[in-house]
Amino acid sequence: MFFSDPKFIQDNCDLLIDSPLDENDLLLTALDADEAISRPFQFSLGMLSEELSIDPEDLIGKPLSITVKPRKPDDGMLSLLFSKKEARFFHGIVSSFSAGVAVKREDSDARGFRVYHATLVPRLWFLSHSTNCRIFQEKTPLQIIETVLEEQGFRPRRDYSISDVRGPLAKRKWDYCVQYRESDLNFLSRLMEQLGIYYYFEHEDSGHTLVLTDKEQLSTDTIDVIYKPFSNIIDEDNQVTMWEHRYGFESGKVSTTDFDYRNSSTNLLASASSKKSDASRDYERFDYPGYYQTTKADQFGTTKDGKNIAEIHMQALDSQRHIIRGASVARELMPGLRIEMEYLGLDDEDGEKYLLTSLQHRYRQNVIPVMGRLGTTDYNNSFTCIPDRTPFRPPRVTQRPVVEGPQTAIVIGTKAFDAKTKSDQEVMTDKYGRVKVQFHWDRRQGDGEKPYENSSCWIRVSQGHSGAGWGMINIPRKGEEVIVDFIEGDPDQPIITGRVYNAQNKLPYRLDDDNEKDNIYISGFKTRSSPQGDVTKNYNELRFQDKKGKEHIYFHAERDFTRVVENKDVLIVSDEKEITQKRIDKVTKDTAKGSQTIEIYKNRTVTILSGDEKFNVDEGNRTVTIKKGNDHTEVEEGKRTAKISKGNDEIEVSKGDRIINVKKGEHKLDVAQDISITSGKNVDIQAGNNSITLKVGQSKIQMKSDGTITISGNKITLNGMKIALKGKQSVQIDAMQTVKIKALQKTKVEGTLGLELAGLKVDGKGQLMSTLKGGLMAEVKAGALAKVKGAITFVG
């Protein structure tokens, strides 16, 4: 065999190349095309060229198309290997280019040639070279897919089509979806596998189109093929040369569930069973979490969604149960098409239809004339297919990204400007105590350099306790750096587990100051008033100092402090207790029963600089016991009032004196009913320079400081075993009408010098010296004996 002087042109070739180079710069000698459903195709090209130094930059990343021309048989020679139908196209982007052996003929004017190799891939393949970390919010899966594709230059309906995607899961908005440290291709592939979406490519001479679909039956287009198992002769251009069934065992049931903290008691378990095999139904493939998605309205997926997810997964497994491997010379085959088998000699398979899932084309073309004649073009393919009645779903082969460990992020607030505080909102949360953060890897920003309020989903915050209406709560605030972990390592499920300080948010106590070395022993917490509180002035704080010998607990309430004790409140002060109060002290007793006990070992001083002190006992007793010592109450200016609305006021002094001193002012005792004073010994009542007056009704006794005692009343009665009326000078008894002196036995009126009654005079010796007269009558009576003596006596 020898090489003639060829002229490298494509006019006589069956395989044509359209590249950025000149028309005849490259001649195709070999094409190995590997294409499959839900997999980027790869076309390997072998080429010859008279151009010995092709610049790879002219081809890398550039589109290139291959046309397979239909051929008619040569005169006198039957060529059954060439299709008599329309041309077939393979279009792709050059991903690699290599220059091989170069042959330059020195003994001829003909130019030499060089072998070149190139690989064509779809535009989709280049997404494997673009990795990203970003967040999608409030978008449907289809919107996410469109966003990623269009960012990479895909044109709708020209470079990609999604019109055949109709499943409910793909068109419902997701609240949150993260692409994390993964390529755009990986990201899209796992989304489509999760939703049961698959894709294939349609080729034209000017380009290729990515077609997405989730239809269970992909295509209605059917190509007839024929299989002759008992013949070694290939005499049909649609002849199948090899046909082999492969059966495999797969699980017969798929179950999944998830957890919704918004409805934590809801059971989200869902299952789907195979429709293909009863023998495998006892083998269940259970997975958790099921990756149910949260919708825009903060509504988590339901068991219906779980059922759809399980059904998609089950269909993907069923697609692998029965796979046919074959080979043929039919050039029209491509993934996504159906073939109808004419099976000679086996009626069971004759007329059956199958869905092509993958193909490997092999073209060989001799572009160098041999013996003055152009070489032939050979073609064959191998393929896989599944029974057409089996719904196709892409297998779950793309790995979800896993966040290897916790991260930190910055808490954000709302971007709404508050005109009063001149700042953004510092605390942005919801009914679950969730917050939003800005991840360090999220390159999206809000207005200017400020993170915006939708930089993440609502993220739950771990607390010390979380019971049903009880527990601990501490909401992270804007600007704080928090520790974010991820449930199951899933970037779509962040959860805040802690907080850390940084250069901007420093510790509340300096640990690097030699003048405050004891700060390293401090623990506790310190808050800041919000919004725009000054951390040095506006804060609440509970601090523990554990330095040996300086132990101290410090509590600071920026405004109010309320303490509720349902039962006992015991306070033990071993040394001193000092209370300084600047404003009002109000203690309110709850209706619940309980006690408070305060035990102080030494002194207790309460000082109220301004305001009132009130002590109320709604029900019960108040007892003050001083075992040893004094009880001293001093009112420097003002009043002291004790009021008993109902009941008694008793003061008991078991031993000692009770003294009331009113140094300036009056002492009044006002009793509605009786006053009783009982003394075991004496009762001593003294007044200064004025008087003592006892008065009731029309009766009155008044004692003046000059010694005058006046007793007045309508009737005065003196009763006693002995009654003595003495006057150092005189005793005078006056009556407007009658003075009556009466004794049951003897009435005796004596005077040292004498006795004188009106009209009657008796000297000191008892001698009558005057006459007893009566204006109308004079009566002398005695109970036993009455004597009247005189010179003349009248009786009767």
Image: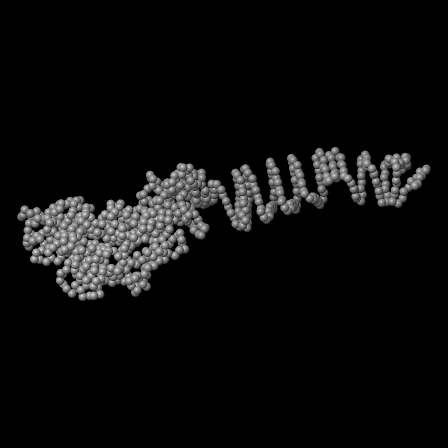
Residue under the point 85% across and 45% down: 744
**In this picture, is 238 found above or below 178?**
below
Asked if residue 190 can be seen in this view, the reply is no
* Residue 275 shown left or right of residue 54 in the figure: right
**In this picture, is 295 found above or below 249?**
above
Task: Residue 231: name its quadrant.
Answer: bottom left
**In this picture, is 601 found above or below 610?**
below
Task: Residue 237: name its quadrant.
Answer: bottom left
Residue under the point 78% across and 42% down: 717
Q: Give the percent coordinates (x, y) of residue 181.
A: 29, 48
Q: Quadrant of the N terminus?
A: bottom left
Q: Quadrant of the C terminus?
A: top right
Q: How is the image coloured?
A: one colour
Residue under the point 72% across and 35% down: 691
Front residue of 400/501: it is 400
Asked if residue 83 can be seen in this view, the reply is yes
Q: Give the percent coordinates (x, y) of residue 60.
A: 18, 46
Count the numbered circles shown.
0
Front residue of 67/706: it is 67
Q: Give the percent coordinates (x, y) of residue 258.
A: 36, 55
* Residue 694 shown left or right of residue 220 in the figure: right
**In this picture, is 319 found above or below 480?**
below
* Residue 441 shown left or right of residue 340 in the figure: right
Q: Give the percent coordinates (x, y) of residue 262.
A: 40, 52
